[in-house]
């Protein structure tokens, strides 16, 4: 290949230079201070139990599907279904507010 020209790599040495000229060594105190920061402690977990009927579970699954894909065109729910959704919301909210 007599017409092959090699590309110039001027300036490429900056790509391969070390990012830290010196190795930084943290002492155990610095690491402990970073790990044991105030405010990083987990909060107390409160577990509450909710009992749902199979119909309520189906309604929740449908609501999650609608929330997952909000851009899809859907008809408004029937009034009785809307009231059931609102009742379910109130049931969940009552347990959360306790």
Image: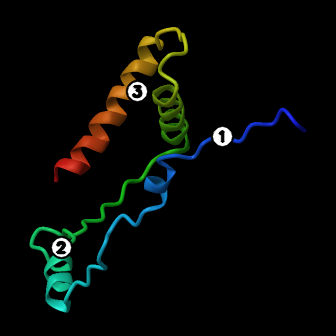
Q: Mark 3 or mark 1: name the one nearer the start of the chain.
A: 1
Q: Which is closer to the viewer, label 3 or label 1?
A: 1
- 70 sits to left or right of 19: right
**Along the line of sight, which residue is nearer the eye, 60 or 4?**
4
N-terminal of the pair, mark 3 or mark 2, is 2
- Is 24 rendered above or below residue 12? below
CB-based contact (under 8 Å), mark 3 and mark 2 = no
At which x and y percent is residue 82?
40, 19
Q: Which residue is mark 1?
A: 7
| Mark 1 and mark 2 residues within 8 Å of each other at the beta carbon | no
Residue 36 position within the rendered picture, expressed as x and y whole percent measured from the top left = 16, 80
Residue holding disc 2? 41
Q: Identify the image quadrant of residue 44.
A: bottom left
Question: Badge 2, how many Cα within 10 Å: few under 14, some, many 20+?
Answer: few
Q: Secondary structure at mark 3?
A: helix
- Is 64 on the left or on the right of 95, as rendered? right
- Spatial CA distance of label 1 from label 2 is 55 Å
What residue do we see at 81% from left, 36% from top? 4
Q: Earlier in the sequence, mark 1 or mark 2?
A: 1
Colour style of the rendered protein structure: rainbow
Residue furthest right as drawn: 1
Tell me, yes or no, whether the two marked residues, 3 and 1, touch with CB atoms within 8 Å: no
Q: Nearer the viewer, residue 24 or 56?
A: 24
Q: Secondary structure at mark 1?
A: loop
Q: Residue at x 30, y 61 (%)?
A: 48
Say which residue label 3 marks: 84
């Amino acid at each position: 290949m007599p017409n092959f020209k090699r590309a110039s790599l001027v300036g490429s040495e900056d790509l391969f230079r070390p990012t830290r000229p010196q190795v930084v060594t943290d002492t155990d105190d610095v690491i402990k201070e970073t790990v044991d920061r105030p405010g990083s402690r987990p909060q107390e977990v409160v577990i509450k139990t909710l009992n749902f009927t199979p119909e309520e579970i189906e309604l929740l699954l449908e609501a999650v599907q609608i929330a997952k894909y909000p851009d899809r065109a859907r008809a408004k729910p029937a009034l009785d279904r809307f009231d059931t959704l609102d009742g379910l919301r109130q049931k969940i909210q009552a347990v959360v507010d306790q």
